[in-house]
Image (cartoon, rainbow, N blue to C red):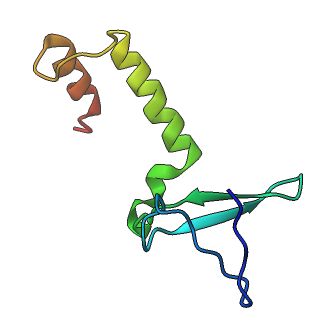
Amino acid sequence: MMLVPDARRRVTLPANFKPGQPVNIEPLEDGTFRLVPMVAIPENQLWAWRSDVQASVEKSLGEYHEGKSASLDSKEGKVFLKKLDPK
């Protein structure tokens, strides 16, 4: 698809772009650009997108899917909760 900028260097995006959808323009090494749809994340939730937090979540999900988890109501869960109690 070819887009031609108007006199103010504006282009009309295809219909599958949502009106008001933020878009990041990424310049690529070959001189082309990539339009990447973006979403807004509230500032108080940015911590969840840090790479160390994401790695921890991925590890936890992997352990869960491998069956390495216990219900907090189980014997193992109660032992785990007792370890967390600072008293």
Left or right relative to 87: residue 26 = right
As drawn, is 79 to the left or to the right of 13?
left
Residue 65, percent across and down?
35, 15
Is the N terminus in the top left, top right, bottom left or bottom right quadrant?
bottom right
Dividing the picture into quarters, in which one does residue 83 lie? top left
- 63 relative to 11, above or below: above
Q: Pinpoint residue 68: horizontal percent, then vertical percent.
A: 34, 12
State the residue at coordinates (54%, 63%): 14
85 or 38: nearer the viewer: 38
Residue, far right: 30
At 15% from the left and 12% from the top, the residue drawn is: 75
Residue 78, image quadrant = top left
Q: Is residue 28 above or below residue 3?
A: above
Which quarter of the rendered picture does the C terminus lie within?
A: top left
In-front residue for pair 81/53: 53
Residue 58: where, in percent of width, then height?
47, 29
Q: Residue furthest bottom?
A: 8
Of residues 9 and 57, which is closer to you in this image? 9
Q: Which is more toward the observer, 27 or 51? A: 27
What's the residue at 49%, 43% (across, down)? Answer: 53
